[in-house]
Image (cartoon, grey):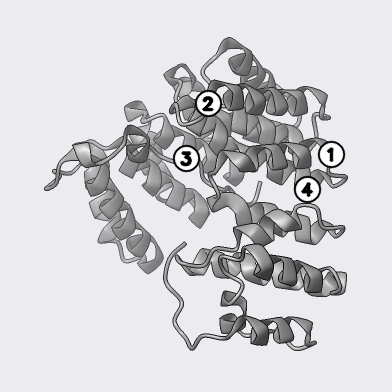
Amino acid sequence: MTKKTSGSKVTFERAIEALRAETEPSQESLLAFSDLAGERLARWQSVWVTLPSDRRASLTEQLRELAEEDIEADFRPIFRFGLSDPDERVRLASVEGLFEDDHPSLIPLLITALRDDPSPTVRAAAAESLGRFVYFGEMDRLSEARRRQVYAALMHALLTSPEDSPVRRRALESLAYVPNEEVDLHIREAYHSENDLLRLSAIVAMGRSGNRAYCEIVRSELHSVSPAVRRRAAEASGELEDEDAVSDLAQLLDDPDNEVRFAALDALALIGGNEAQKLLRAAADSDDDVLAEYAEQALEEFEFWHGEMDFPMALFEEEDLKPKPIRRQGK
């Protein structure tokens, strides 16, 4: 979420009328559906189920995008309802819309989607979404019962999904936060797979694991012929805070693929140190406007992680000072 959306308010009843209309509702009309509960939620549901599937899919996607833009918009009740929609597009947008929902009550709903949804795309999204709860479990923010429930559901999905399934890949990436031998075994098996996408997920998992035993493997992948692999290896190097990767990441700042260059900058910001800072400053002074702009952002990130704080670190919880699970596109 990035900003608060401004504009004149629309009453709930007017917004319901706009929902029924064939025209695209205004942003203000959609905001009237924020924080629905009780009678209003029931009224919205009674109208929603009468809409054509294309209309529901379009509206759910609009609500998802609006939730990302407006820090005060809360469509979680709508997205939770959407998890059981007959239309795959609505279910997928609903899972994606719930990425900001960290309440444990969401866990059974996501597990049901992971286990029972007929769409592998939706199941994969559910597996990915459960990743943050794995992370929370490792930070002692979940009960032991919930922690075991999430782990068991993801491990079952990993073991029962075909090697070329996106569900298997997302389950592996989500389980990577758990530092045990079982997960380590599956990460290493995936890395040696002949399936390129599964190998890519193994590199993502290596970074998320925080296990520095993977550093050498990840470092070697920084020189892959595949831009996607170089990008994920750069991200993983940052997550592993691998100081020995700085010189390799420096080479990636000249990579022909912008996404690889951006990942290298992010990694340098996480790793820290004098050499990383010099590289970031040099990139920020580059004649390449695209690289320079991104490097400026990376320098701000560097200062946050490694600069002197003018406020007490005790204000933060430990988990708030660590990189969070992020949604990854294009895999």
- Residue behind mark 4: 121
Q: Residue furthest front?
A: 39
Of the image marks 1 and 3, the number of the one nearer the N terminus: 1
Of the image marks 1 and 2, the number of the one nearer the N terminus: 1
The crowding category of the residue bearing disc 2, from other C-alpha atoms within 10 Å (few below 14, some 14 to 19, many at least 20), is few
Is residue 101 or residue 209 the one in the foreground? 101
Is residue 231 shown left or right of residue 244? right
The secondary structure type at the circle numbered 1 is: helix
**In this view, the mark in front (2 or 4):** 2
Is residue 22 shown left or right of residue 7? right
- Residue behind mark 2: 143
Numbered badge on residue 235: 3
Give the amino acid type for the residue marked by disc 3 in the picture.
Answer: Glu
Looking at the image, which residue is at 75% across and 88% down?
23
Residues under labels 2 and 3: Cα distance?
30 Å
- Residue behind mark 1: 116
